[in-house]
Amino acid sequence: MSSQRKVPVAYIRGGTSKALFFHEHDVPSPGTNRDRFLRRIMGSPDPLQIDGMGGSHIVTSKIAIIKPSEKPDVDVDYTFVQVGIDNNVVGYSGNCGNISAGVGSFAIDEGLVKEKRSGVRIDPAIDTQEVIGATLNSGVLPTTTALDSTVINDISVDFTICDVGNTIVFARAQDLGILGNEKPADLDNDTALIARIKELRGKAAQKVGMCKNWELVDEQSPMLPMVALISPSTTPETHIQSRLFLDNKCHTSMAGTGAICTAACSRVTGSIVNQLISAENLQKTTLEIQHPLGQIPVVVKTRPKSNDDIPDYESLSFIRTSRRILDGSLSVPDDVKDTFEDNASSKRDHPANGIPSGITLSHESQTNGLAHRPRATTTKDYLAFIGNLRYSDLSPEVRQKLRLLFLDYIGVAAAATQLADSSTPFVKAARALNGGGTTTAIGNGQTWSASTAALLNGALAHSLDFDDTHARGCLHPGVSVISAALAEAENCPEAAVADFWTALAAGYEVTCRLGVALGTGGYSLGFHNTSTAGMFGAVAAVGKLRKVDFTTMENAFGLALSKVSGSMQYLANGSWNKRLHPGFAASDALTCVTLAEAGVSGAAEPVEGRYGLLNLFSALRGKSTKDSAGPFLDDWEFDSTAIKPYPACRMTHGQIELATALSLEEQVYDVKAIVVSLSKECFAIVGEAAENKTKPRTIVDAQFSSFYQTAVAWLYGSQLGWTVYDFIDDPRVGSLMEKIKVNVNKSYIGLESSIRVEWLNGKVREEALRNPIGEPENPITWTGAKTKFLSLAIPVYGEKRANAICAIIPELDAHGLKALMDLVK
């Protein structure tokens, strides 16, 4: 037992059901491994579920998986799972109204509610816009008719398929051979009845496309549709009676979504439910549904309509209570421990004893939340890491990674002086701002004040969108950090090269970890993680070079919070704001550290505070996720920083690679259609069919357009460098973009993408790519980085000087920074 893995869990009653509640980052990733894990912990397949938590009943064989939502107006995302009892079914297609009642209390207890307020109301009313057509996306009536019919055992059976909350097939109880008031156990033991219900369910499912063969409905659509056998009520207080069947078993009471769907169907003229309710009761705003354990009232309000049998629903609501029964740790049997192997963060975040080394539990998490939940990394954790970091802590591999990233930064910044349309105005503005100084701007040939050089280098190095990226942090980490560190190091004669590398390591690590904590939630609120997280990484690098004490660094962090910005409104017109973001961060970092050194106090808890970085600049509000980084030094987050092979948004690189490869198979002009599939995070940035993406007019538009990057790669290949943007007005590119469709694949995460191509000759090919070139799983080597650097630097410096820069960086400790800066100016 002692060797079994421990997973935090809560056991919660919601309405008339019970479920295990997990944070999503505590369970295996979606797919086969998650299914195996959930079956095993419930004890399925076994009628008694004796070796698990299932409870041997459909109302207790339920699981809720919760994660912070990336939507600004939503606290949590909730995945409901119905686990089969005596079979291997793990169903995700439906919802459970009863368990939904427990989600609200769980979110509050676990600190997942974004706004702290004195009271939180969990509104029982269901948004009809969200639940109508919830499963099939075909409206209230998926077949478009209120009454369909089929033949069961040579008997014609009328039925209604309604899709509100969940998809349910309604039929008269007497048509299936029962009265409708029987006990659930008696109905479950009637094998002939269960066979008829399965046949009805299967034929209805086949009719609406939920399965191809009705006889295989249990395999092809295991949980939905449900079947409700309806009969007149037998008590004066109720209006109709129901026996609801899920997984070929009768519900002991009534599912919450079953009640909502029944109420909705009652107002559809001519439906099975509508026919069995008296005209008087149909006029009431509350439908009382009789079920085996009593009754459930459902408020159903509609707006008047003159020309449609399907009503316009104003409200569908019911009330359910919940209670947290148990908090604890679930022991994972050895035979499914391997299900976590595809989830590196799970192994990192949850060692055998349940608590990662170096992480303590906050009082709140011990008393109100799940046991063994690590607290989020605080400002003081970051400051302790920065203050304690030494050059000797950097392994040879870490030092080599820093050299590679530094080389890439110089090449990209130098190339921007000649290629980026914004460079001339940036330099003109810098001259106006410059107060004089000796600090180098790359590829410029002039010297500047430290703050102006930091601004200019940061803007140049980001102008081509060719600088390094960190996928988990959704940002470009190096551009702010290196720009600030270079400006500081040139003006800090006592700083050794070892100090410079140490400062870069500190800055990169802070930026990447904060990026992971912000996640895609930053983009959900319209903020650019490169700017928001990069501000703190730049401060870390400057403060480390100046060797400031803990209090000074703390104040510098607090002041940096007021400098954080980086709106993504630049996407509206392809403006140059984005290119300036890291320059602003690098320049402002120098200001913040200088103010702190003078004794200016900064805000407390700038990372985790109520109005701190994570709570203001990300929809995740600083919630721990499965992507949360491990302990400092044990796990270098920045080591997964990638060098970009193409000067476009990183989120388009998978499509560039796939389009280039697939275009070699047939004539490139004989394409009928191309379908690109992206993760929802990438789709929001590069895939939406806005006019500036489907018909880009500026370079920034094209950099953030999956349509454009796919079309150019298809027609002209991927080895174009900056000339990729010479085709913005190319008629062939424009014509091909009209044939490209971009959509979301909900199973994709991060940079994962796929392309499906259909040629005019009927040939169809589809390929997917998880990790584009440059990611840790598919890295660019020093040779590859040098090749990229020379292609960018030779036009600026000439071949001899460019090669000299390449040669000096691996030996920088011996030559010193001044020798390098003399070469790159």
Image (spheres, grey):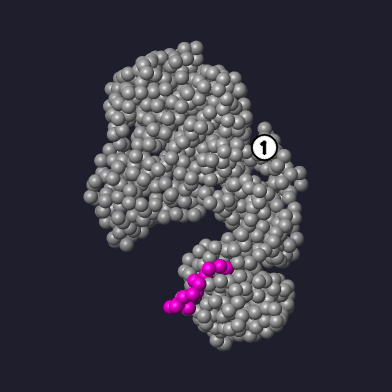
Q: Residue at x 58, y 71 (%)?
A: 300
Dividing the picture into quadrants, the one containing residue 95 is: bottom right
Q: Residue furthest top?
A: 494
Q: Position of residue 209 (x, y in %)?
A: 48, 70
Q: Residues within 10 Å of mark 1 (few under 14, many from 20)?
A: some
| 305 inside magenta stretch | yes
Q: Which residues are magenta?
A: 303-316
Q: Is residue 414 above or below residue 342?
A: above
| 777 inside magenta stretch | no
Q: Residue at x 47, y 15 (%)?
A: 492
Q: Is residue 330 visible?
A: yes
Q: Residue at x 28, y 45 (%)?
A: 697
Q: Is residue 316 above or below residue 806?
A: below
Q: Which amino acid type is marked by label 1?
A: Pro
For residue 808, side relative to residue 390 (left or right): left
Dividing the picture into quadrants, the one containing residue 620 is: top right
Q: Is residue 25 visible?
A: no
Q: Position of residue 794 (x, y in %)?
A: 30, 25
Q: Is residue 725 above or below residue 166?
A: above
Please state, as top left, top right, bottom left or bottom right, where the C terminus lies in the image: top left
Q: Residue at x 62, y 78 (%)?
A: 229
For residue 77, side relative to residue 807 (left or right): right
Q: Position of residue 297 (x, y in %)?
A: 65, 71
Dividing the picture into quadrants, the one containing residue 571 is: top left
Of 733 and 462, the residue lying toward us: 462
* Residue to which mark 1 is pinned: 356
